[in-house]
Amino acid sequence: MSYAIEFTGPTTLPVAESNVAFPVGRIYCVGRNYAEHAREMGHDPDREPPFFFMKPADAIVMSGATIPYPQVTKDLHHEIEMIVAIGKGGSDIPVDKALDHVFGYGVGLDMTRRDLQGEAKKMGRPWEMGKAFDNSAPCTPLKTVAMVGHPAKGAVWLKVNGKVTQKGDLAEMIWNVPETISYLSKLITLRAGDIIMSGTPAGVGPVQAGDTLEGHVDGVGDLTISYAK
């Protein structure tokens, strides 16, 4: 069956060391999943239940790209994260079975129009437009579980123009990957192709036109993205 309109097809992420692609369905992002980041955002880091917001799959842009500075905002922020690619769907997944559903891992950025997000919060409105905009999810190719295992500790950092701005460790997550998968699967039925962005450490901050961002997650990979002047 052909499409009724011109359509580019599904968004995909390359799989490292292969000639296959991972089709991306939905992107779920975990909010405030590192204690120090929760504090810098003005919230209590106690272990409250996790919460989630979404980005469209076509917000993905590949590492190495130069992208335009986003529209409207005057306060674009970076948030470096490990991303988790779901290879097998399910609902109400037990924590001890959650990692069986993981296809692989990558490095991503949850780019945020902080001024739009903040204004929406003040007005008691959804802040989707602060998060779910064009090119707001730069990502690396995925590495499979067979390549990297299930990273649970290791450095996570981001540099802006060579200067370290964010630095943390995967072990500092308030809700680790299997707990996050299990909790989310109680809210919705996870599907193969879903991506989970697992949260960001402290140090989020502004990005200007012309900046180059370099992100890293130990054992997973490195991401680079630049913003056009």
Image: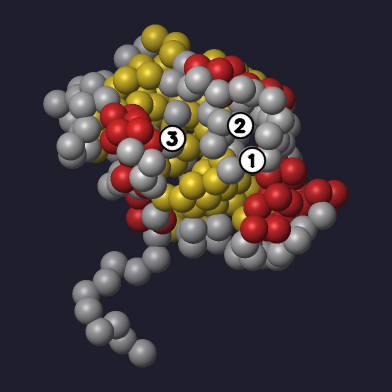
Q: Residue furthest right?
A: 96
Tell me the distance, in whole angstroms, between the alpha carbons under discs 2 and 3: 14 Å
Q: Name which residue type carries label 3.
A: Leu
Picture layout, residue 134 above or below residue 89? above
Q: Say which residue appears at 46% left-offset and 50% top-offset.
A: 54
Tell me the distance, in whole angstroms, between the alpha carbons under discs 3 and 1: 19 Å
Cβ–Cβ below 8 Å for labels 1 and 2? yes
Nearer-the-camera pick, 119 or 187: 119
Q: Name which residue type carries label 1.
A: Pro
Picture layout, residue 199 above or below residue 160? below
Q: Under tag 3, what secondary structure?
A: strand
Residue 118 position in % (x across, y down): 34, 31
User: Left or right: where does residue 51 sit relative to residue 25?
Assistant: right
Residue 131 position in % (x across, y down): 37, 41
Q: Under tag 1, what secondary structure?
A: loop
Q: Say which residue appears at 23% left-offset and 22% top-offset.
A: 208
Answer whether residue 218 is visible to the viewer in this image. Answer: no
Answer whether residue 81 is visible to the viewer in this image. Answer: yes
User: Left or right: where does residue 32 sit relative to residue 87?
Assistant: left
Q: Quadrant of residue 92?
A: bottom right
Considering only order in the chain, which callout, 2 or 1, is on the residue closer to the N terminus? 2
1 vs 2, front mark? 1
Considering only order in the chain, which callout, 3 or 2, is on the residue closer to the N terminus? 2
Residue 85 position in % (x across, y down): 59, 51
Considering only order in the chain, which callout, 1 or 3, is on the residue closer to the N terminus? 1
Quadrant of the frame with the N terminus:
bottom left
2 vs 3, front mark? 2
The residue where tag 3 is placed is 109
User: Left or right: where does residue 110 sit relative to residue 93?
Assistant: left
Picture layout, residue 182 above or below residue 71? below
The residue where tag 2 is placed is 33
Q: Which mark is residue 50?
A: 1
